[in-house]
Image (cartoon, helix red, strand yellow):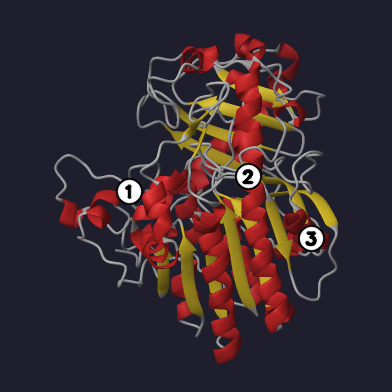
Amino acid sequence: MNVLLISTDQMRRDHMGCGGNPVIRTPNLDRLAAAGTCLDRAYVSNPLCMPNRSTIATGRLPRNHLCWSNGIRLPAHERTIADVLNDRGYHTTLLGKAHFQNFGRGRNVPVEQAGMECREAWVKGVLSADWTGPYYGFQDVRLCVGHGVGTLQTAHLGQWVRRRHPEALELLRQPHEPSPTGAPQCSTPPVPAAAHSSTWLGEIGPEYLRDRARDGRPFFGWLSFPDPHHPFTPPPGYDTLYDPADVVMPRITAEALADKPPHYRRAYEGGEPWEGIGANEHLANITEPQMRETLARTYGMITLVDENIGRLLDALDETGLAENTIVIFTSDHGDLMGDCGLVFKGPFLLEGLINVPMIWRIPGVAGGVRSAGLMSSVDIAPTVLELLGVDVPAWMDGMALGALARGGPSARRTAFVEFKSMYRPDLNLRAAVTADAKCVYYAGQDFGELYDLTADRPEAKNLYDDPDWSDVRCEMESQILDDAVLSHDERLMPECHA
């Protein structure tokens, strides 16, 4: 059995037709869900790119693989699912955005030592597109670095653009068409969709699949789209594909900040840097027309991704690989997208940020299942190994949930999310999510969050200090404590008595 893992970046679960969005057009994701299991309750282990991508790759929690924040490289000694499958004869590849290492470099780090994903190292020629791996166990690697049209000039994507669409590099010199509403980070670049990173992946992904069909090697392929991450700059045609008047606006507005922990309002009012929110971004000033434009542009970016996912699914069908290839779709995390007046990401463990899309299509298993069973990003690698009949290593922290992936029940009763702020060490969060409630514990603080997820608007009211919910709060904080104590790193267990 082969595996094709498809991921997006910063995409909400409710930004798919099969995720319940009545406006956005995602026919290929809907097609995948119709033949598989679509999970409504899949959660990240951490709501930032680098930690959660590292968790997906290793099956380990951020506290154990040590990449607990953006800006921290995944240690080179960490083993990944690619390492495990390499030992069993699989061909492993990672195409697109990896983000196991930093896009920038520290002040005292020479550019020659900045890592394989450092933009400056690619621009200065320290790194060459002749390199194609290995990288964290993946034998074949072709990278894009960053987001927006800046990705078109570096790494393997840049090489493809120079070869296939050299005119796009000239177009980059022209100014972007500005946002009609002045929405932050919204504009239209002059570069056509044919030269976009999503289109690149829609080309090289099917090529990889056809190569494997020819040589017959079993494979584990991770194809990683860098969209719909901000900036909100879809190419011409996709920027106006959706009418802003039609988008689904947040059900919970800034009024809900009244009972949230104090850092929520500080981030909303602006002037400080947060993970994902710049110091110059004043979210309180975003108008409804601007929020609508942001959503419409995001929908356009997702539709372009969906079209190229369709090219992957078509290649599987045309080569016959669909008959023995497990296909998984997910995102590294979501986006606040106006929830509680906030945008992007940060120390706000709201559902729009931590509840991600997740679809599993398994050959020979009936599809069209929509499940409320819980799964975590840390479970992806163990579940893949279980479905392949491979023993799950003891060092993986996640649960093997093959039954859930097949449309059955979930053995997971609680999903845990962790977050430690690089900007504010006092914000060290742990969340527990169950079938009907969510508790967010702030270490060393006298505030927290507790929500009834069965309510009509689950996060509109914080129940943390509500005496009627004290028993639920106590029980869920106990679960968070148990998780913190029991999820020790198996690699650090004693080898012998003394």
- The amino acid sitting under disc 2 is Gly
Q: Is residue 227 above or below residue 112?
A: above
On residue 102, the disc is: 1
Q: Nearer the viewer, mark 3 or mark 2?
A: 2
Q: Secondary structure at mark 1?
A: loop
Real-space Cα distance between discs 3 and 2? Answer: 23 Å
- The mark that comes first in sequence, 3 or 1, is 3
Q: CA distance from mark 2 to mark 1?
A: 32 Å
Mark 2 = which residue? 237
| Res 137 → quadrant | bottom left
**Which residue is at the front of the view, 33 or 249?**
249
- Can residue 118 be seen by looking at this rendering? yes
For residue 239, side relative to residue 109 (left or right): right
Q: Amino acid at mark 3?
A: Arg
Q: What x and y, as percent, mark residue 473? A: 66, 24
**Cα distance in 3D space between marks 3 and 1:** 35 Å
**Residue at point 72%, 32% (across, down):** 243
The one nearer the camera, 337 or 452, is 337
Q: Is residue 395 visible?
A: no
Using the image, determine if residue 78 lies above or below residue 471. Answer: below
The N terminus sits in image quarter: bottom right
Disc 2 crowd rating (10 Å Cα; few below 14, some 14-19, many 20+) is few
From the top left corner, tell me how far across and down residue 209 is, in percent: 58, 77
The quarter of the rendered structure image containing the C terminus is bottom left
Identify the residue at image location x=45%, y=32%. Answer: 276
Residue with the mark numbered 3: 31
- Disc 1 marks which amino acid? Asn
